[in-house]
Image (cartoon, grey):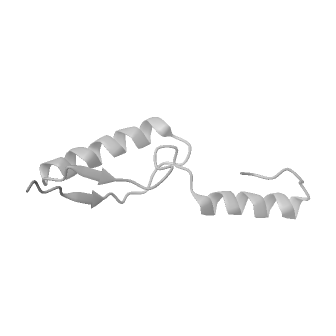
Amino acid sequence: MTRLLVAAGQAVPVNGDPAANVALAADLTRQAGVRGVRLLVLPEAFLTGYAARAGARQRDVRRRRGCSRHVR
């Protein structure tokens, strides 16, 4: 039976900088590969650097300023 080593990658992405996040993901993948990992799982939206909490803060600021436009 073939074994498959799977790992969860954990790092802090750069908000709004996909190029930096791709480079970080590539580095994490190389590091994991050296350790025998065949499948590295990164958080959803890691490459875009989107953080749900950052979006929530933007919505709160807009509400306080009286803006009606919602941030998604």
| Residue 16: quadrant of the picture | top right
Relative to 54, 8 lies left or right: left
| Residue 25: quadrant of the picture | top left
Residue at x-position 42% and y-position 43%: 21
Relative to 62, 20 lies left or right: left
Residue at x-position 70% and y-position 62%: 57
How many tags in the picture? 0
Instruction: Indicate whether 65 appears above or below 49.
Output: below
Q: Which residue extends farthest front?
A: 1
Relative to 22, 55 lies left or right: right
Query: Which quadrant holds the N terminus?
Result: bottom left
Residue at x-position 72% and y-position 57%: 58
Q: Nearer the viewer, residue 49 or 37?
A: 37
Q: Nearer the viewer, residue 10 or 20?
A: 10
Residue 14: % across, % down: 48, 48
Relative to 40, 66 lies left or right: right
Q: Which residue extends farthest top?
A: 19
Residue at x-position 38% and y-position 57%: 11
Q: Nearer the viewer, residue 4 or 37?
A: 4
Q: Which residue extends farthest left?
A: 1
Residue 34: % across, % down: 13, 49
Residue 22: % across, % down: 39, 39
Residue 29: % across, % down: 26, 46
